[in-house]
Image (cartoon, rainbow, N blue to C red):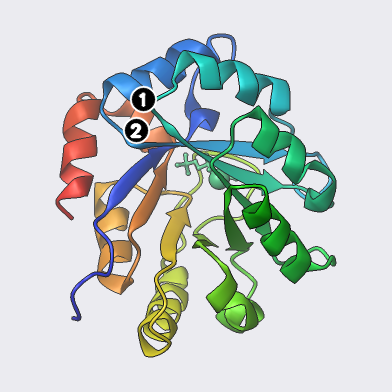
Amino acid sequence: MPAPLHSALLAPSLLAGRHTHLAASAIEVANAGAPWLHLDIMDGHFVPNLTFGPQMIAELRREVPSLFFDVHLMLDEPQRYAETFIQAGAQLVSFHIEPSLDHRALLARIRTLGCQNGLVLNPGTPAEAVEPFLHEVDLILVMTVQPGFGGQPFRRDMLAKLARLDALRRERHLNFRLEVDGGIDPTTGRECRTAGADTFVAGTSFFKSPDRAAFVREVAAW
Ligand code: DX5
Ligand code: ZN
């Protein structure tokens, strides 16, 4: 197995936090020592669920200024909202490859606005769909569940996709992060690490963990 390109980091997902006390949940993430906070934005169209919007991001930004805000847009029209989320404090904005839009233009615009960008693939979308964009991204997010809800079982059949994207990254001497999201826990996360992932979203397993700080430290050693 080739040496990993990036050290492993945990991005706890606020979706599994307490929605009546999201600031408290975000502070728990910071107190556990996690470097990133993963924020799931859903529009009820691209996915059959709703979460929160830019005002929530802006207010959370003030509560936890040390966390890197990894904003995952599950929207049919991410181009309409990306800028608002960046103004609200997103440091990375990822959006899906599946809706039809000018992906290249949006990737460029996110960077122009001083933010990192990312492209996301649903489980049914092959790696080939993002291959033309790999030299234009800061992160590729491979969904390891169908997006929309936390607490779903990990899709082991996504490991081959991860390995393919990691191989392309090495062949092309690229440096983007390779993130996984859905059903990640210490067992499935390590499997993803072996397949090439370096950035691990964890909702349910993080918030249920009896020792969250230990979980964060463990991931850094994967
Ligand atoms: C699912 C979201 C995930 C979700 C993962 O649509 O994109 O970020 O929070 O939750 P777990 O870790 O519980 O599978
Ligand atoms: Zn997500």
Image-based side of 138 in relation to 189, left or right: right
Q: Are marks 1 and 2 in contact (CB under 8 Å)?
A: yes
Q: Residue at x 53, y 22 (%)?
A: 61
Residue 126 in sight in this render = no
For residue 51, which quarter of the picture? top right
Q: Which three-letter amino acid code belongs to the residue tagged 1?
A: Val
Which residue is situated farthest in the bottom direction here?
171
Q: Residue at x 60, y 84 (%)?
A: 128
- The tag earlier along the polypeptide, 1 or 2, is 1
Residue 96 in sight in this render = yes
Find disc 1 in the rendering and name its residue. Answer: 29
Q: Residues within 10 Å of mark 2 (few under 14, many from 20)?
A: many
Q: Is the N terminus in the top left, top right, bottom left or bottom right quadrant?
A: bottom left
Q: Determine whether the residue tagged by mark 2 lies in a helix, strand or loop.
A: helix
For residue 12, which quarter of the picture? top left
Q: Is the C terminus in the top left, top right, bottom left or bottom right quadrant?
A: bottom left
Q: Which three-letter amino acid code belongs to the residue tagged 2?
A: Phe
Q: Determine whether the residue tagged by mark 1 lies in a helix, strand or loop.
A: helix
Asked if ligand 1 lies within 8 A of label 2, the reply is yes
Image-based side of 218 in relation to 193, left or right: left
Q: Residues within 10 Å of mark 1 (few under 14, many from 20)?
A: many
Give how far across and how far down residue 54 sits, in percent: 71, 27
Image: 158 above or below 129: above
Image: 31 above or below 182: above
Image-based side of 90 in relation to 163, left or right: right
Find disc 2 in the rendering and name its residue. Answer: 206
Q: Which label sits on residue 138?
A: none
Q: Quadrant of ligand 2?
A: top right
Image: 15 above or below 70: above
